Image (cartoon, rainbow, N blue to C red):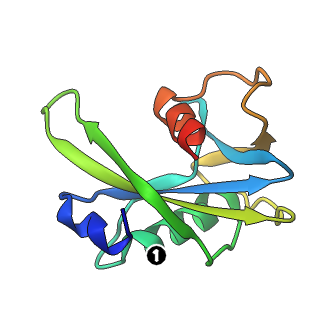
Amino acid sequence: MSEEDMFNYLPLFGSFAVIKCEVKYLLCFNVWREQWELPAGRREGDESPKECAIRELFEETGQMVSDLDFKGLLKFQKVNSGEVGYNPVYFAEVEWLQPFIDNQETSEIRLWDLKEEIGYIDEVDIRVLEYI
């Protein structure tokens, strides 16, 4: 699907930012959920899905990457309400990571090879990485 086609699938909620560096993927440790996860979050105001991915990536990891490529949509269903929604997934490959910026949501970042045991990682994030 093209990036423009995603608007045929509503509602669009937040966006994922998948970053590959040195054949590994960037994860951040969410202190509230106590798990490793991909940088992601809800859109704010009238920002586009891509702008959301760029902002969430920076806020959660300190990485400033604006050249993200659209890779597809993640379809999900909320457990409590049964509501179906979609999250765009964006991707970029970088040569190095910028320094982590301390914040309230994330305690650290790391590169993961999809094999090393690092603790709990949300199944949705694992599926996104397998797709990418």
Q: Is disc 1 surrounded by few (<14), some (14 to 19) or many (20+) residues within 10 Å?
A: some
Q: In the image as oriented, which residue stretches furthest toward the front?
A: 1
Where in the figure is residue 17, as x and y percent of width and height? 56, 58
Camera-side residue: 115 or 39?
Answer: 115
Residue for point 83% across, 63% down: 99
Which kind of residue does numbered mark 1 sit on?
Glu
In the displayed structure, does residue 82 sit left or right of residue 33? left
In this rendering, is residue 35 above or below 9? above
Report the number of discs. 1
In this rendering, is residue 35 above or below 98? above
Whether residue 31 is visible to the viewer of this picture, yes or no, is no
The secondary element bearing badge 1 is classed as: helix
In this rendering, is residue 27 above or below 59? above
In this rendering, is residue 47 above or below 21? below
Residue for point 62% across, 67% down: 58
Camera-side residue: 28 or 32?
Answer: 28
Where in the figure is residue 26, as x and y percent of width and height? 71, 49
In the displayed structure, does residue 121 sit left or right of residue 72? right
Where in the figure is residue 67, as x and y percent of width and height? 62, 77
Q: Image quadrant for the N terminus?
A: bottom left
Residue for point 18% across, 58% down: 10
In the displayed structure, does residue 104 sit left or right of residue 87? right
The residue singled out by tag 1 in the image is 51
Camera-side residue: 76 or 130?
Answer: 130
Where in the figure is residue 113, as x and y percent of width and height? 78, 35
Residue for point 82% across, 66% down: 98
